[in-house]
Structures are given as C-alpha cells and as structure tokens.
Image: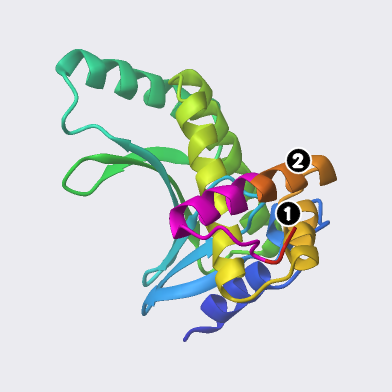
Amino acid sequence: MEGIETQVLEWLRAGNDTAEDIVDLPWSVREMRPGMYVAEHPRMPFSLLVAFSEDFIHLLVPLGLETFSMTKDEKLRVYHTLLRLNDQVNLMKFTLSGMDDDVYLRVDLDKKTLGKDEFNDALTALLIGLMSAVSALGLEEAFAKEIFDRIVGMVLERVERGASRDELMRFLTVKVGMSVEDAKNLLNEVFAAKKEIDGQGEDVGYF
C-alpha cells in the first residue's frame, strides 16, 4: 500500500463525531478489493467510494439513478440538469458508469499534491453536489427514504451484535445527530417491526 493511500485512509478513519469538517468525522472504511474502498458515516447521506489509480485518487458517490432505461425525453432532462450542475458546483462532476448508465458524482485528486484540506474540500463538494442534484431532479422523497432505510439497517446490524438500548441511543443521537425524541421513536418503530417479522410476542429486552 502506498504512503498516500495509507494517509487518505487514516484521514477518513480518525476523528470524532462532533467534528465540523467532513474529513474529521470517523468514517467506517472497508476494502472492497485492492485499491478500492467504501467509506460511510451515519451523518453523511452517502456512501463514498475511494479508488486509487497510478496517479490519482478517485472519489465517487452513487446518486442511485440509472438512466439506461429512461426515455429520450427523460434522459435529456436529467443530462441537461446534471451538466448545468457541473458548471455550478466546483471541483466535482457528474458522470455515467456501468451497464445501466448509473449517475455518479466524482472528484479526481492528484496524488502528488493532495493535502488534507483539499481532500476535505472534495468531500464537501460531493455533499453539495449530491444535495443540489437531489433538489434539481425532484428526488427528495426517494432520497429521504433511502437515508432512513440506511439508518435502520445500521441499527439492526448493531442489534444483531448485541448492542444495548443505551448504545443504540448514543449511536442515533451522537453519530447520526438525531434528537433524543426522534431516536426513541425510531427505536420503537424498528423493534415493533422486528417483533412482527420475527413473530415473537415477548419483549425483546430493550423496552
């Protein structure tokens, strides 16, 4: 592993949940294959793909929008919107990738000159670009549902690992940034649904 690869992963993994800069949040990073990683933090509304090539570091965020099956008019509207956003948001760009022409946000960073501040600027640009695209394309409802489902999935993963109610509350209020009331309501919904799915009438031990 190159020095810059180690450094970038360290920037992502280190930090604390109250940090103001995105790069200083403690991201969870896992390796997908050599030179390719996925990073997530509950407070960030996206999964970050980090790819290392010979001279560049590529940061990619999937928008969750495939365009291959769209009609010509739908494609024209989407492509026109994204090209306009390419001109409005600095540093990042929208691209198509994969067999279904999925939309990604992308930043390419030069390995030779990359510093932590520029890396943070790139993450900020991706966040701004993502929120701009969601608004411009009218995807707010679907996007909100995706974020909610992602948080619920993280809660269930922690339940399976034996997390206590206090640990789940800390996760939702500190890492995700929810209010205490919203966190309690979410846990009530999650465990009510889990109990129904499991077909268990007894209390699961959290309430």
Q: Residue furthest front?
A: 201
Identity of the amino acid at label 1? Leu
Give residue 161's position: percent from left, percent from top.
Answer: 59, 76
> Viewed as shown, does residue 28 lie left or right of 175?
left
Q: Which residue is mark 2?
A: 182
The label shown at residue 172 is 1
Is residue 143 shown above or below 29?
above
Residue furthest to the top in view is 73
The percent position of residue 114, horizontal first and vertical second, equals 59, 64
Looking at the image, tell me whether mark 2 or mark 1 is earlier in sequence order: 1
Q: Quadrant of residue 3?
A: bottom right
In terms of secondary structure, what is the magenta stretch mainly? helix
How far is mark 2 from mark 1, CA to CA? 9 Å
Residue 180, magenta (yes or no): no
175 is higher (above) or lower (below) than 44 = below
* Figure check: 65 above or below 8: above
- In this picture, which residue range is highlighted in magenta? 189-204
Residue found at x 75% / y 47% = 183
